[in-house]
Amino acid sequence: MENMYLSRGAAKVVEVCAGVQAGEQVLVITEQSRMSIAQALASQVYRVGGEPVLCVMEPRRQDGQEPPRPIAEAMKGSDVFLSVVGRSITHTHAVKEAIAAGSRGLVLTQFTEEMMIHGGIEGDFKALKPVCIAMAQALAGTEKVLLTTPGGTHLEYSARGRRGNHLYCMVEKGQFSTLPTVEANVSPVEGSANGIIVADGSIPYIGIGVLEQPVILQVKEGRIIHIEGGRQAKMLAEDLAAKNDPQVYNVAEHGVGLNPCCHFCGFMLEDEGVYGSCHIGIGTSITLGGKVKASCHYDVIMKNGTIVADGRTLMENGKVLL
């Protein structure tokens, strides 16, 4: 039986976030474990006059793994694609090429039925759009960015020549956005980041989730060189080492959470959107404006960020000043 409580969230995703119009072909990519959400989205697409195509794939072995080739080709041919999966396909060539081909996409990674009803999805995306764009524009192309937190983060990097990305859960042709996080981000120039990252919010990957104690990552010349902390830090360090890929240590992203309705719960796209939080993505950066394709992309999240870009304070102790 279809969960009727998913219908309101599905309507928001399809009509407000994706802006599906009558006659558009909408590809819904999912896994067996998330069929209830995918079916609710497909039903809403049909309800507004679109043509839904539901593709069920085998769950990816790890975040960042490419989807099957037939699905990647279907993404490029769609007007809209909606990714409702457990393991992320966001940072893949498939997404990058679909957007370049003119499709528009929304990524609902790790979504649960509860997330379709409560939490970040209740955010006022239209009202948050100008704040998100302003933050992305302020980060874009900066010579020097300094990120600090009360927990001990002190990271400097350059975003010279890099675009700012604004993800506010609404997309037009040639755009993609995550959901329900509202975030602005930029990809640091490779080799430019130095300092220390103290994640005290969440690492919503490989079963780590909300942090019991801080995870400390030392950064030198754009790469993570040491990870320390407790049980969860060990999980991260061992997983990255097992990838046998030096690119997984690349400092790929600095993201800023801007959705007041998000909360830390251990799920990626809720945690990354928490208002006033910052996250550092490590690994793949090709979908963000960087040059690195690694075997994964993980985000480590810290609370109450202060951001100074070329001498201008953009956020102070978790409060946006733009």
Image (cartoon, rainbow, N blue to C red):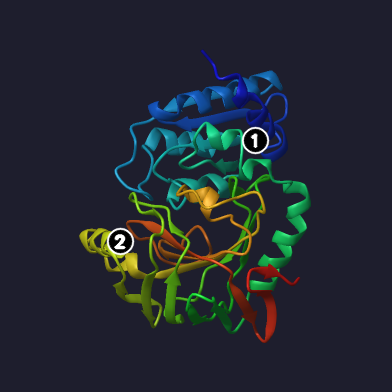
Q: Quadrant of residue 224?
A: bottom left
- Helix or strand or loop: what does disc 1 sit on? helix
Q: In the displayed structure, does residue 128 sit left or right of residue 101?
A: right
CA–CA distance between discs 2 and 1? 32 Å
Q: Nearer the viewer, mark 2 or mark 1?
A: 2
The answer to which of marks 2 and 1 sits earlier in the sequence is 1
Identify the residue under disc 2. Answer: 236
Q: Which mark is residue 13?
A: 1
Q: Quadrant of residue 135?
A: bottom right
- Contact between marks 2 and 1 (CB within 8 A): the answer is no
Q: Is residue 71 above or below residue 206?
A: above
Q: Is residue 315 above or below residue 65?
A: below
Q: In the displayed structure, does residue 322 sit left or right of residue 40?
A: right
Say which of 1 and 52 sits in front: 1
Furthest-front residue in this view? 212
Q: Amino acid at mark 2?
A: Leu
Q: Give the total number of marks visible in the rendering.
A: 2
Q: Position of residue 251 (x, y in %)?
A: 42, 71
Q: Is residue 16 above or below residue 141?
A: above
Q: In the displayed structure, does residue 168 sit left or right of residue 201?
A: right
Q: Amino acid at mark 1?
A: Val
Q: Position of residue 273 (x, y in %)?
A: 58, 55
